[in-house]
Image (cartoon, rainbow, N blue to C red):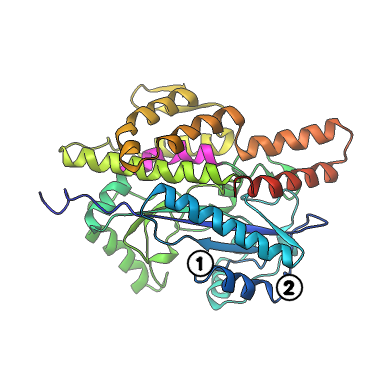
Amino acid sequence: MSLLQEQPSFTLGVEEEYLLVDAETLELSVDPPEGFMPACQEQVVGQVVNELMLAQVETATRVCESVAEAHRELTRQRREINAVAEQFGMRIIAASTHPSALWRDQKRTPLQRYVTLQEEMQATARRMLICGMHVHVGIEDKDLRVDLMNQFRYFLPHLLALSVSSPFWEGDETGLQSFRLTIFSGLPRTGFPEEFSSWSDYQRHIETLVRARVIEDASMIWWDVRPSARFPTLESRIFDLCTYAEDTICLTAFCACLIRMLWRLRVSNSRWRSYNLLLLEENRWRAMRYGPTDRLLDFGKGSMTPFGELLDELIAMVRQDAEYFDCMREIKHARTILERGTSASLQLATYRKALADGASEQEALREVVRFLVEATMDGC
């Protein structure tokens, strides 16, 4: 068996970015107490760091050997960081935007990397009051990593649709289920990556940008999926931050299973068909706009197909891989998301119910945050 046919480790890692809110007012904690971050880092050693805004906290699981281990790690982190936040009169929420917070009110983390980013990107960086989720899947061979990235792009809109959690922006009901990506797309080197023929092809393009001093290194490539700049992994970054931990693990399982399915195709001298960015980006937009409540373009059929039908096809497609990872329950949870609603749809339902019950718009938005505080810790 050749090197590319040897099975990758398929280890897993999950990064999440939380927002901090005041436990009483439910407003964003613009300037958290000085002792908060040191207390977090003492409690969750080596797994929590500052993000761009002081009101954000970024976490990363340890390298996990299974979906079940990733689940344990994720829920432990949420539980421990929220406990520290409670000590300082705050709570964490897992959502890609705070329903009513204003980016102009935020205080930025004074780390040089973030200072440089804001100097370069100006208002596009100052608006980055958004949170996401990243899933790493271990693929040691570099050429294989790039090849699977090329093919995996097809599935990203389907997974984004299940994760959507940013229907509000600065108190406005945006009409989108993932408004976060409209903000993030203001940065360069975002969206879908181009298709690369090999690791050396990919590296050649990165080195061109580094030599020209456009970027310091590959960590400043912010595509929806990329070879990680720090780890031997394929890193999926398109997701909104899932409010429910179970949803995060569902998408983590899907990443692992879909990537292993693509690897199996390669071993059998086959591959997923390559599609033009025009088509891929159409589905990306539809996922942002509608989440899983409408239809996506089925490229093979050349027609619009209800998301539920596409989801059933995906579940059937990865059944063998879900059995390998012992995560069929986590994969099938996608149907629960579809039936129960995404975070975005539940936030909107909470908001509209509060308005119907006589609440003002500001009071209704506060009810959305109250829902997010409770749902973030559900199952943790």
What x and y, as percent, mark residue 15?
49, 57
Magenta extent: 151-163
Query: Residue flagged by tag 1: what amino acid is it?
Result: Gln
Vertical relation: 101 (above or below) 273: below
Q: Nearer the viewer, residue 86 or 25?
A: 86
| Mark 1 element type | loop
User: Left or right: where does residue 79 sit relative to residue 267?
Assistant: right
Mark 2 neighbour density, 10 Å: few (under 14) some (14–19) many (20 or more): few
Vertical relation: 322 (above or below) 297: below
Residue sitting at the far left: 1
In the figure, residue 300 lies in which quadrant?
A: top left
Task: Identify which residue is drawn at 51% across, 47% down.
Answer: 239
User: Left or right: where does residue 279 sit relative to residue 247?
Assistant: left
User: What label sits on residue 47 in the rendered view?
Assistant: 1
Counting residues from the N terminus, which is met first, the one under dot 1 or under dot 2?
2
| Mark 2 element type | loop
What x and y, as percent, mark residue 82?
66, 59
What x and y, as percent, mark residue 350?
74, 36
Q: Is residue 157 magenta?
A: yes
User: What label sits on residue 33 in the rendered view?
Assistant: 2
Q: Main secondary structure of the magenta part?
A: helix
Q: Please indicate, yes or no, whether residue 339 appears anywhere in the rendered image.
A: yes
In the figure, residue 53 lies in which quadrant?
A: bottom right
User: What label sits on residue 322 in the rendered view?
Assistant: none
Q: Please indicate, yes or no, whether residue 186 appears anywhere in the rendered image.
A: no
Q: Is residue 57 magenta?
A: no
What x and y, as percent, mark residue 64?
39, 56
Q: Nearer the viewer, residue 17 or 128?
A: 17
User: Left or right: where does residue 370 sit relative to residue 120?
Assistant: right
Q: Nearer the viewer, residue 161 or 123?
A: 161
